[in-house]
Image (cartoon, helix red, strand yellow):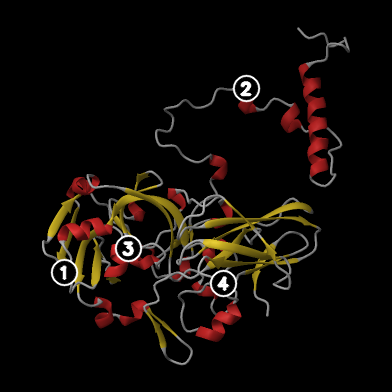
């Protein structure tokens, strides 16, 4: 036993207190000189998790996040749609780091609810202007050569509520219709080449197996370039809401073209929706004209923290400003960050992998002095496209569309650390 009366033989708790005080002083010095006046019981005292055995390895056969992270979830906006079977929810971007979105947090968009499909009963048919119409089972597809790619997926209406001004107070709601995952699948060109696309085949029409029979028209050049038939994301099978057992991946292009629960691809000589529903591929301009075939998701970025749902909680001192940037035209070359509403810019640090048509993580490490800030980020992609301000975007395209809003987002940080969605001229 420990001799509590002998100074040369201090108790374990006394040693912990001394170490905690020293460590606290060192950490506080690095953070701006704030030291605690007494030992921190979180380190000097034994906690319940130090005393008792935890759950065994079979307690949760499919692992779940810590219960202390229960607030990190997708969220919807109830008034956006009449009911949720044809609605959307949003990725909690402000709670994440890196570039990969966990499967359970990828935003959902459905047109008739999520289809539950038995993989052994699922079929993919290729027909139309092909030499040999074909039908594949999932087992057939799983035997084909595989590819692995990291891509972002963004809804064309992401940030759509912000065209006429600041509306939603949180980057989960202003920018959360985007995610980025690692896909495993088969190149679409592999399937099309097996069927033999005729020279007159200029477009494909993919169709989903859900109750809406979701269809979109895609040029054959894109289909033969980098499109995929994906059956896994982040290493595991697609989730039901993400198109299990098979979905189309259309890198860099708007999310409504990434048909889920894919069951049929028809090859034709013209776009079906040009004849039937031209609004699917047009953005109405101020003068009554429309931008046609606006597929690519343009260069864009957002600061995810600090942001309205992630205010500054620690007061003055070191602050990590971080966010995401992406472009449907390729990789991100640079991201600039402004603390004063665009008067001055500093180059942020891109960190982590840089994949074609994927999210890119950026950081700006600052020493916040407690004054108000107007945070902005501005992305530049490898093609040289520069993210515009919202005013520049409105001057060029008006405010009639809800699609393809890639304008620079502004967050106002108050002296107390709270953050609000604002616009400045």
Q: Earlier in the sequence, mark 1 or mark 4?
A: 1
Q: With respect to residue 326, does 23 lie above or below? A: above
Disc with the residue nearer the chain's start (3 vs 4): 3
Query: What separation in Å lies between label 3 and label 2 (alpha carbons)?
Result: 58 Å
Please report the residue visible at 64 percent of the width from the left and 62 percent of the height from the top.
308
Q: Position of residue 271 (x, y in %)?
A: 25, 77
Labels 2 and 1 touching (C-beta < 8 A): no
Left or right of 425: which side holds 370?
Answer: right
User: Mark 4 and mark 2 in contact (Cβ < 8 Å)?
Assistant: no
Task: Tell me what residue is drawn at x 30 percent, y 47 percent.
Answer: 146
Residue assigned mark 3: 225
Q: Nearer the viewer, mark 1 or mark 4?
A: 1
* Residue found farthest to the bottom: 287
The quadrant the N terminus occupies is top right
Query: Would residue 83 be found to the left or right of residue 375 on screen?
Result: left
SS at badge 3? helix
The residue wearing badge 4 is 387
Give the label, 3 or 4, closer to the camera.
3
Q: In whole angstroms, how far apart are the C-alphas of marks 2 and 4?
A: 53 Å
Give the alpha-carbon distance from disc 3 to disc 4, as whole Å: 26 Å
Q: How far is disc 2 from disc 1 in space, using C-alphas?
A: 70 Å
The residue drawn where x is 82% and y is 47% is: 32
The residue identified by callout 1 is 198
Sequence-first tag of 2 and 1: 2
| C-alpha distance separating marks 1 and 4 | 39 Å
Query: At which x and y percent is residue 227?
Result: 32, 60
Q: Point out the frontmost of discs 2 and 1.
A: 1
- Which quadrant of the figure contains the C terminus? bottom right
């Amino acid at each position: 036993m420990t001799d509590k009366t002998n100074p040369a033989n201090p108790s374990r708790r006394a040693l912990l207190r001394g170490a905690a005080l020293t460590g606290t002083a060192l950490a506080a010095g690095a953070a701006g000189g704030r030291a605690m006046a007494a030992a921190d019981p979180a380190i000097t005292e034994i906690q319940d998790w130090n005393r008792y055995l935890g759950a065994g390895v079979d307690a949760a056969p499919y692992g779940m996040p810590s219960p202390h992270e229960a607030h990190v979830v997708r969220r919807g906006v109830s008034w956006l749609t009449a009911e949720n079977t044809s609605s959307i929810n949003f990725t909690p971007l402000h709670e994440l780091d890196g570039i990969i979105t966990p499967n359970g947090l990828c935003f959902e968009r459905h047109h008739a609810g999520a289809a539950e499909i038995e993989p052994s009963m699922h079929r993919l048919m290729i027909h139309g202007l092909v030499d040999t119409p074909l039908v594949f089972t999932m087992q057939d597809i799983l035997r084909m050569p595989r590819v692995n790619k990291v891509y972002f997926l963004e809804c064309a209406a992401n940030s759509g509520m912000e065209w006429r001004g600041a509306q939603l107070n949180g980057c989960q709601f202003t920018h959360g219709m985007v995610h980025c995952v690692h896909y495993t699948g088969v190149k679409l060109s592999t399937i099309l080449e097996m069927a033999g696309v005729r020279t007159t085949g200029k477009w494909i029409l993919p169709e989903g197996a859900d109750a809406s029979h979701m269809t979109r028209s895609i040029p054959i050049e894109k289909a033969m370039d980098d499109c995929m038939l994906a059956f896994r994301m982040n290493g595991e099978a697609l989730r039901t809401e993400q198109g299990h057992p098979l979905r189309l991946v259309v890198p860099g292009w708007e999310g409504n073209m990434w048909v889920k629960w894919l069951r049929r691809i028809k090859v034709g000589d013209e776009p079906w929706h040009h004849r039937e529903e031209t609004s699917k591929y047009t953005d109405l301009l101020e003068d009554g004209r429309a931008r046609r075939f606006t597929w690519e998701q343009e260069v864009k970025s957002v600061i995810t923290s600090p942001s309205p749902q992630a205010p500054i909680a620690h007061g003055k001192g070191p602050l990590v400003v971080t966010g995401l940037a992406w472009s449907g035209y390729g990789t991100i070359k640079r991201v600039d960050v402004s603390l004063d509403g665009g008067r001055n810019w500093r180059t942020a640090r891109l960190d982590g992998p840089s994949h074609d048509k994927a999210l890119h993580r950026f950081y700006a490490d600052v020493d916040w002095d407690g004054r108000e800030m107007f945070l902005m980020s501005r992305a530049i992609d490898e093609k040289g496209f520069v993210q515009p301000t919202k005013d520049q975007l409105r001057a060029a395209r008006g405010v009639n569309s809800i699609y393809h809003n890639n304008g620079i987002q502004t967050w106002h940080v108050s002296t107390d650390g709270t953050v609000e969605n604002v616009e400045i001229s």
